[in-house]
Image (tube, rainbow, N blue to C red):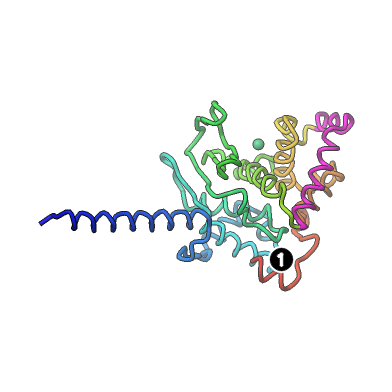
Amino acid sequence: MFTVETFGKVFIIYVVCYLLYIIYYAVGLYQFNPFVKLKPLSDAEKAILSEHFPFYDRLPNIYKERCNSRIVWFRSKKKFVFYGNVNRREELKLVLSASAVMMTLGLKNFRMMRSLLRIIIYPSQYYSRIKKRHHLGEYNPKFKTVIFSADRIWDGFEVLDDNVNLAMHEFAHVLCFEMSGKRSWEARRFRVGLKKIRALFEEEAFRLKLVESNYFREYGMTNLHEFFSVASENYFETPSIFHKDFPELFYIIQRMLNFDFEVSCIINPFSADDEKQHL
Ligand SMILES: [Zn+2]
């Protein structure tokens, strides 16, 4: 018989299960879930990385190992959400994780815990309710969410030296937010760099050089943060030209990221202890 007592028990079980689910979900979202398995990179996945990130093959072994284990961490712990008919989902998770990790390879803290919980991917251009217009990608610091359109991510990797890379662009925004107000030494170093870029960006002669050279996308002229994101795309895709044409800015970004993509090298290497902690 279905008595009040049975109903009470069922209700309590339901509430307990629901609470457990909420806790499980929250823990997973905040990247502390111990049950998430870290799946190592397969040879096929490493081949995809070599194809899309030519600099991956040039990495010295020690950095390559760090790069691989960080990609595995990022891919397993961040929440990827796909909307609509998005193809090649596993590949997208791989290249996006790799983009975030390569941008922060010279930093001890690559996990973007303060700034990034979710990565949302639409098949193509989507309507942004936040900005009330159609969008190809955006970062929303309030919701710690970065949003991409899959076709533009692939466009970014199609030509590897055209200085257009949506993944790098958006992760540069995420990194700026991650570093703002943080007390670590590398975050301070990052903010000092951003201040120097602001000073350059506001200099009339520098702006003139930017416009005349055509090296950076025009969109970078929108504001300081867009300029940093656009410059990060260039720093990543054509570091030698960047170094030659805009050395001052090149060295600022090199110091901010503690990584030189031209020579695939960390500027200030970690100590052996740090190396273990920050893999
Ligand atoms: Zn932007």
Outermost residue to the left: 1
The residue labelled by disc 1 is: 60
The correct choice, above or below, for 59 with respect to 231 in the image is below
Residue 187 inside the magenta-drawn segment = yes
Q: Which one is in front, 46 or 209?
A: 209
The correct choice, above or below, for 41 with respect to 79 in the image is below
Which of the 4 image quarters holds residue 102?
bottom right
Where's the C terminus, which quadrant? Answer: bottom right
Q: Residue at x 70, y 41 (%)?
A: 229
- Regarding residue 68, the answer to whether it shows in the image is yes
Residue 127 position within the rendered picture, expressed as x and y whole percent measured from the top left: 50, 30
The magenta region covers 185-213
The correct choice, above or below, for 238 with respect to 267 in the image is above
**Is residue 130 rendered to the left or right of residue 21?**
right
Q: Residue at x 81, y 53 (%)?
A: 255
Q: Which one is in front, 190 or 41?
A: 190
- Regarding residue 154, the answer to whether it shows in the image is no
Query: Crowding at label 1, few (<14), some or many (≥20) Cα neighbours within 10 Å?
Result: few
Tell which quarter ligand 1 is in.
top right
